[in-house]
């Protein structure tokens, strides 16, 4: 098969508020809506391991080097992070009406009164109360974008608000096409369709499960006729499975790959194979009737265990019990 690429976007901003002992905001010390870098690894664990809604922890430090997407941490983190804050999908998702959605997740973190005292110059997010993945961060900057500092006294309290905006597909999109040739020199044209990011892709649905999850095996494949309903064959019946893997190059390119699978001549036969749909749980194979929408090219409609790729053969494939059938597939995501 062919590699195809899906682009996902993320941007973030933070605000800092310093409160006096009575809880009143000291405006002269506040920083509003400053852009920050969401790191490559932060985007990876969030997008590809269902971490969008995870509990994050805020930290501050005294470093002076600009944070970039390749940064692994704050430059000089001050010991002690805030308590954790999570987020939810429902009510925070907007359909961009271009095949994508934007999920705006806001988290507010507080250090207790007098917990942080001193002059600080950087702020960031982690997905653990100690160590963990550096999700996002940046130097503290003034209204002109120049690095600055804030000084917190013993009778003051620091509150940090982080907003991360995630953009991802909410529909299928044609991502690639190509041709394969069998050992009899017959050629078959195919198209590859990306799938919605969420398994249940209704906007603002409360289910957070992603089709792009990287810690589950891409271990099943279904063979379907042109109607998207008739199951021609599936791997559950013989216990075959794809043991897939996910890799990240550290710079925002993520590759999903299924292992090569070979179906022997005696294993199966089918006529007019049109769709191949991948997924992660056998239960979906057992309930495969009517799961492909041939109008929208979405496989396993509203499933929480579907693989994020659907392959369509434009000239369907036949397989007899005297023929073998092999398949492997991969695609990339850029973050």
Image (cartoon, rainbow, N blue to C red):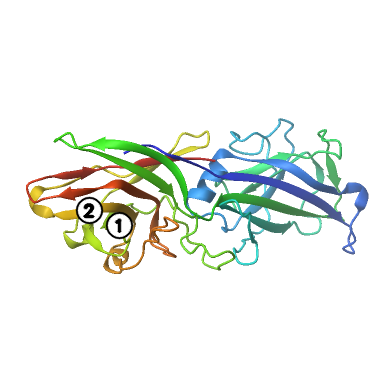
**Residue at point 58%, 33% (across, down):** 70
| Residue sitting farthest toward the top | 65
Query: Which label sits on residue 226?
Result: 1
**Residue at point 38%, 39% (across, down):** 177
Vertical arrangement, residue 4 with respect to residue 233, above or below:
above
Vertical arrangement, residue 161 with respect to residue 43, above or below:
below
Q: Position of residue 315 (x, y in %)?
A: 27, 46
Mark 1 and mark 2 residues within 8 Å of each other at the beta carbon: yes
Left or right of residue 304, residue 138 in this image = right
Vertical arrangement, residue 265 with respect to residue 300, above or below:
above
Bin the neighbour count of mark 1 within 10 Å (Cα to Cα): few under 14, some 14-19, many 20 and up.
Answer: some
SS for dot 1: loop
Q: Quadrant of residue 38?
A: top right
In the rendered image, which quarter contains the N terminus?
Answer: top left
C-alpha distance separating marks 1 and 2: 7 Å
Q: Position of residue 280 (x, y in %)?
A: 34, 57
SS for dot 2: strand
Identify the residue position indicated by label 2 in the image: 272
């Amino acid at each position: 098969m062919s590699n195809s690429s899906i682009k996902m976007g993320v941007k973030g901003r933070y605000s800092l508020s310093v409160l006096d002992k009575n809880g009143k905001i000291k405006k002269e010390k506040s920083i509003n809506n400053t852009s920050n870098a969401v790191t490559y690894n932060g985007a990876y664990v969030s997008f590809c391991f269902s971490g969008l809604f995870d509990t994050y922890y805020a930290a501050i430090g005294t470093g002076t080097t600009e944070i970039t997407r390749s940064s692994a941490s704050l430059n000089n983190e001050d010991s002690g992070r805030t308590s954790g804050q999570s987020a939810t999908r429902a009510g925070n998702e907007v359909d961009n009406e271009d095949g994508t959605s934007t999920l705006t997740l806001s988290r507010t973190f507080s250090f207790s009164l007098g917990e942080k005292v001193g002059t600080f110059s950087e702020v960031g997010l982690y997905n653990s109360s100690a160590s963990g993945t550096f999700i996002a961060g940046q130097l503290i900057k003034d209204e002109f974008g120049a690095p600055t500092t804030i000084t917190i006294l013993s009778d003051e309290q620091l509150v940090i608000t982080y907003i991360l905006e995630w953009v991802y597909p909410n529909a299928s999109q044609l991502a690639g096409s190509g041709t394969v040739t069998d050992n009899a020199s017959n050629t078959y044209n195919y198209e590859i369709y990306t799938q919605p990011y969420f398994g249940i892709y209704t906007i603002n649905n409360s289910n957070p499960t992603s089709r792009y999850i990287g810690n589950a095996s891409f271990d099943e494949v279904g063979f379907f006729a042109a109607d998207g309903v008739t199951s021609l064959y599936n791997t559950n019946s013989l216990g075959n499975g794809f043991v897939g893997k996910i890799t990240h190059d550290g710079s925002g390119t993520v590759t999903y790959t299924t292992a090569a699978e070979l179906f022997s001549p005696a294993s199966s036969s089918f006529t007019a194979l049109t769709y191949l749909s991948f997924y992660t749980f056998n239960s979906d194979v057992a309930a495969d009737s009517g799961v492909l929408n041939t109008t929208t090219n979405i496989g396993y409609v509203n499933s929480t265990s579907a693989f994020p790729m659907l392959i369509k053969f434009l000239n369907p494939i036949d397989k007899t019990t005297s023929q073998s059938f092999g398949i492997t597939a991969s695609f990339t995501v850029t973050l």
